[in-house]
Image (spheres, rainbow, N blue to C red):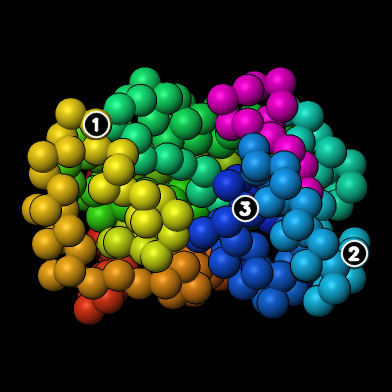
C-alpha cells in the first residue's frame, strides 16, 4: 500500500509510540487524524507538525477511547475533513495493575470499540474503501509479563482479537487487513512509570527491571518503523510482528 494521500487515524497519538507512528505516516505521505485524551499534549504536537507539514495534513481531536460518543464524533469529523479512513492504528493504552478495570477498559474494550466504529467507515461491504488496521499489542500479548497480569491479559486479548478479525475480514470480504505489533520494552512514559504501576505486584519490581535490562529497550521510532511495514506490505494479514532490541520476528497465525 502506497501511503501518499491515504487517511490514517491514530489513537493515543500525542506521545510515545503514537507520536512516532504519526510522524512516520506523515513522512510517508499520509494525512493523519490524531486522537488523544490529553488535549494539551495533542494540541502542542499538532502545532509542531504544522510547522513541518501543511496544516491540512493533520487533524487533532480530543477523544477518550472509553467514550463511544467521542469516538463516533472523532471518526465522523475525520471522514468529513479528509474524505474517508484507510488506516487505523489502535495505540491508546495504559499499564496500571492498581487500576486493573481501567486497564481492561482502555487496552481491550476501547480498542474493540474504536475498531468496530471505524469499520463502519472502512468496510467495503458498507461503502468504505477497505484498508488496514494495526493494533499495538506487546510482547506481553504472546508471553507473560509476570508483574503485570492484567496488562498481559489485555494484550493477549488484543492479539486474539486481531487474529480473529483478520480471519473474519477475509471470509466476509471487508477488504481490511488486521495485524498486531508486539514490541518489547519501549522508551515511553509507560515504560518510565512501569515500576510505579505494579500495584499488588510491586514486590516484583527488581525482576521486571532485570527483564528490561536483559531484553533491552527500543525507542518509539523503531516501533513505528515496524508498524509502517505492517501497513504498507499488503501480504501481511493476521500477523504479529515481535520487535525487541535484538529480535524482529513475524508470527503468522494459522487457521
* 24 inside magenta stretch: no
Distance, label 3 to label 1, CA atoms, is 26 Å
Residue under pointer 3? 13
Lower position in the chain sequence, tag 2 or tag 3:
3
Q: Nearer the viewer, mark 3 or mark 1?
A: 1
Evaluate if marks 3 and 1 touch, with contact meaning CB atoms under 8 Å apart. no
Dot 2: element: helix
Q: Which residues are magenta?
A: 60-71
Evaluate if marks 1 and 2 touch, with contact meaning CB atoms under 8 Å apart. no
Residue under pointer 2? 55
Lower position in the chain sequence, tag 3 or tag 1:
3
Please tell me which residue lies in front, 190 or 55.
Answer: 190
In the rendered structure, find residue 176 and report the number of the disc placed on it.
Answer: none
Q: Residues within 10 Å of mark 2 (few under 14, many from 20)?
A: few
Q: Residues within 10 Å of mark 3 (few under 14, many from 20)?
A: many
Q: Position of residue 103 (x, y in %)?
A: 39, 30
Give me the residue at 52% from left, 43% from top: 92
Give me the residue at 37% from left, 63% from top: 186
Give me the residue at 77% from left, 42% from top: 61
Amino acid at each position: 500500500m502506497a501511503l501518499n494521500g491515504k487517511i490514517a487515524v491514530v489513537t493515543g497519538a500525542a506521545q510515545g509510540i503514537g507520536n512516532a507512528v504519526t510522524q512516520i505516516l506523515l513522512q510517508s505521505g499520509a494525512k493523519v487524524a490524531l486522537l488523544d485524551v490529553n488535549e494539551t499534549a495533542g494540541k502542542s504536537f499538532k502545532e509542531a507538525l504544522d510547522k513541518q507539514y501543511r496544516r491540512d495534513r493533520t487533524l487533532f481531536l480530543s477523544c477518550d477511547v472509553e467514550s463511544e460518543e467521542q469516538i463516533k464524533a472523532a471518526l465522523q469529523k475525520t471522514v468529513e475533513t479528509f474524505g474517508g479512513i484507510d488506516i487505523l492504528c489502535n495505540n491508546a493504552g495504559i499499564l496500571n495493575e492498581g487500576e486493573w478495570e481501567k486497564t481492561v477498559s482502555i487496552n481491550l474494550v476501547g480498542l474493540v470499540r474504536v475498531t468496530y466504529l471505524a469499520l463502519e467507515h472502512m468496510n467495503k461491504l458498507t461503502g468504505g474503501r477497505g484498508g488496514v488496521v494495526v493494533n499495538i499489542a506487546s510482547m506481553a500479548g504472546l508471553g507473560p509479563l509476570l508483574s503485570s497480569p492484567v496488562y498481559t491479559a489485555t494484550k493477549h486479548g488484543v492479539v486474539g482479537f486481531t487474529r480473529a478479525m483478520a480471519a473474519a475480514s477475509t471470509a466476509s470480504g471487508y477488504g481490511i487487513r488486521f495485524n498486531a505489533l508486539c514490541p518489547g520494552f519501549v522508551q515511553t512514559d509507560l515504560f518510565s512509570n512501569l515500576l510505579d504501576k505494579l500495584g499488588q505486584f510491586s514486590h516484583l519490581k527488581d525482576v521486571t527491571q532485570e527483564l528490561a535490562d536483559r531484553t533491552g529497550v527500543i525507542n518509539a521510532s523503531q516501533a513505528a518503523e515496524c508498524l509502517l511495514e505492517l501497513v504498507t506490505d499488503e501480504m501481511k494479514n493476521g500477523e504479529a510482528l515481535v520487535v525487541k532490541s535484538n529480535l524482529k520476528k513475524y508470527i503468522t497465525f494459522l487457521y
